[in-house]
Amino acid sequence: MVEYPRLDLVFRALGDSTRRGMLRQLAVRERTVGELAEPYRMSLASASKHVKTLERAGLVKRTVRGRTHFCRLNPQPLAKADGWLREYERLWDIRLARLEEMLRHPDNEDSDR
Amino acid sequence: MVEYPRLDLVFRALGDSTRRGMLRQLAVRERTVGELAEPYRMSLASASKHVKTLERAGLVKRTVRGRTHFCRLNPQPLAKADGWLREYERLWDIRLARLEEMLRHPDNEDSDR
DNA sequence: ACTATATTCAGCCACATGGTTGAATATCCC
DNA sequence: GGGATATTCAACCATGTGGCTGAATATAGT
């Protein structure tokens, strides 16, 4: 019953505004670790940890060229997370539809019990 | 520049498969805390903490009737998270489109610098 | 070889998280 | 009132997270 461990990592990676900001930068274009760190008032080491977190979640791919680490967005996990959300919105839509149905036919309540 | 604090809570709440499982149950119908806890091998107190986490993230609304706490899904934060993801997929799509454009016209690279 | 640059590593700290247990609270029922 | 039921609270523990600093590593440029 243990769900894909990946999804935990993806959602937890998204649960921090610094990392979401980095993803925003990466959505525009490839960035180095230093460029990703620059907007934040934290140390480079801390920012580097955030990049690693994104990497562990599969959201970022890294290419080392010389001393510089180039990062690019890998959108697959985002799509996966989005797919999960969409599925639940679908279930919830069905629930709303059932509710509407119930309101139209008030005798028939709780028909899926 | 501090982003909506709510989004942190939503994504972090989603970053645990127990809580995602509870949301799945709630997508079907309203459940009590005990019902939500039942599928898991953890103590009721622990499950209760998960419910509270979902509640703090705004994903669950609770109604107390007598000694029983009824929980229902509140989909707005899910929609918000989904909206965030969709926005980033849009940016990434634009990036892909720009890449394609670049491949068609190889002279014009990095035109948004 | 030396110095500057890009980045990670290791150790530390404070706080959050996810689990436990045992007691408290509130309600329902006889 | 008294006992069973539903749930939370409080204290505790282990581990994770997000920040720091200072040292290490690797590369680039002179």
Image: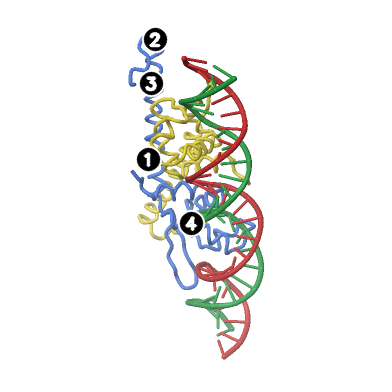
Chain colours: A blue, B yellow, C red, D green
The Cα atoms of the two marked residues, 3 and 4, are separated by: 39 Å
Upstream in the sequence, badge 1 or badge 4?
4
Q: Is residue A101 above or below residue B98?
A: above
- Per the model, the C-alpha gap separating discs 3 and 2 is 14 Å
Q: Which residue is mark 4?
A: A53
Secondary element type, mark 1: helix
From the viewer's perspective, is the residue at label 3 or at label 2 nearer?
A: 2
Quote the CA–CA distance across marks 1 and 3.
21 Å
Q: CA distance from mark 1 to mark 2?
A: 34 Å
Reading the chain from its start, which is encountered first: label 3 or label 2?
A: 3
Mark 2 or 4: in front is: 2
Q: Which of disc 4 and disc 3 is earlier in sequence?
A: 4
Q: How far apart are the alpha carbons under marks 1 and 4?
A: 21 Å
Crowd rating for badge 2 (residues with CA inside 10 Å; few <14, some 14–19, many 20+):
few
Disc 3: which residue? A97
Name the amino acid, label 2: Pro
Between the C-alphas of marks 2 and 4, the distance is: 51 Å
In front of the other: B64 or A84: B64
How many residues crowd mark 3 within 10 Å: few (<14), some (14–19), many (20+)? few
Residue wearing tag 1: A83
Q: Find residue B107 and name its label.
A: none
